[in-house]
Amino acid sequence: MTILSDGKSNRYSHLGGKRFNAEVNMARTDDIHAAVRHIYQASLVPGEWQRALEQITRALGAHKGILNETSIGDTGLFVFTGLTRTCASRLQREFDMRAPEWIRSIPVGTSLRQTSAISDADFIRSDIYNEAVRPAGGFYGIVASLVRTPVHEVYFTVGRELGAADFSDADADAMNLIVPHLVNAVEVRRRLVATDMQVRSAFDVLAYVDIGVILFDVALRPVFVNRCAEVLASRGDGLQLSTRDVLATRRDESDALHRAMALSAAWFQSGRDARERVIQQKPAARLCLSREPPRLPLVVSVMPFAADEGAIEPLGAKGACGMLLVREPDGPLRLDLDVLIARFQLTRREAQLAALLARGSDLAQAAARLGIGIGTARGYLKQILTKTSTHRQAELVAMVLQNSMRVADAA
């Protein structure tokens, strides 16, 4: 084992509350800070992981790097630099299928220099060297365990070319400064993915709920119409649909509907924070579309809509920026408040407010129905959005409908 030193004094500095050897000069300190910044950017923007890995590798004086995440039934992050895809895949396979005991024993959230765990002679005889490291032209490495559970593992590894010197104590110190941030970023990513899947599932179910749902774009064209809305429109009484328009039977009601839709479509162009827009105010409208007597008018709620394109991709609703909820007064929406309370740990009052919003009431109307002030209602709504991991009323409505409403037969 060879440990290189530049002969500098053994003075100490601080970064993030941890001491490291003064060998980590100012240039390296800047590289580490840049790496940490890129790590947190990558946790929010998946496309940034490649740049983050390259920056980490540079900060550690490494030539190669790989971040490998594996879950039961799914392969998550798989990012590499300085390696061909074939070599990276071989290394990934070795970690997934038969990682050596010295790697398996690395405590989560820490790193280990290869030469601190296994001699060069033993490493040359190991499967991981002969099957993955040697074909990639590498030798010395540092391995970090970021996550290890029975169903989820994440490892981060950096390495140097065959013939290059081993990683120094300063390199190992720098790695240990970076690893906790990687752990945090991977956890942030996991939570965001889980929330995204939850929201996608909520939007998927909109296709079959017992209430008419129409999503429209900035040109007020319908981009998604669920089964219930199709049935209501097919009767030609009160609501009419075409590929280019949403109409009421009466001209004056169509004009009012279009005005409300236009206000909702423009809402997310304001640049304000999404949750604050929902809590403070919104151009929600509640309209009645007349039908032939003795049938009661259809009740239509118009509200802004915004979601990540990936979340609404299953609906084919690209470009959606507004939502119409259409229901028949004689077909009341049945919501199970107990399910909402149990599923999201809502209070009874919060569940009642969420149900009223899902039925099409705006915040002021819901507050009046509950006999509370608008300020109190805003406080409740802020808690509801946090507990349901949603940011917009459209997401909240979808989540409520998914979790508490009877779903129509999809056949």
Image (spheres, rainbow, N blue to C red):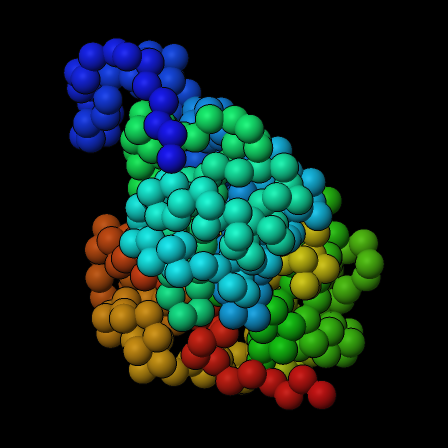
Task: Tell me which residue sits at (74%, 52%) in the image.
Answer: 221
Task: Looking at the picture, tell me which residue is in the foreground, 121 or 134.
Answer: 121
When asked about the image quadrant of residue 3, the answer is top left
From the viewer's perspective, is 40 left or right of 201?
Answer: left
Measured as percent of width and height from the top left, residue 67 is found at 51, 45
Asked whether residue 298 is in view, the answer is no
Asked whether residue 342 is in view, the answer is yes
Q: Relative to 400, say whether 331 is above or below.
A: below
Measured as percent of width and height from the top left, residue 318 is found at 70, 51
The quadrant of the picture occupied by the N terminus is top left
Measured as percent of width and height from the top left, residue 153 is found at 44, 60
Q: Relative to 284, say whether 97 is above or below.
A: below
Q: Relative to 85, say whether 331 is above or below.
A: below
From the viewer's perspective, is 176 left or right of 268?
Answer: left
Task: Looking at the picture, tell me which residue is in the foreground, 336 or 362.
Answer: 336
Task: Looking at the picture, tell me which residue is in the foreground, 187 or 373.
Answer: 187
Q: Residue furthest right?
A: 243
How many marks can you see?
Answer: 0
Task: Tell me which residue sits at (50%, 74%) in the image.
Answer: 402
Task: Tell me which residue sits at (70%, 66%) in the image.
Answer: 225
Measured as percent of width and height from the top left, residue 248 is found at 71, 63
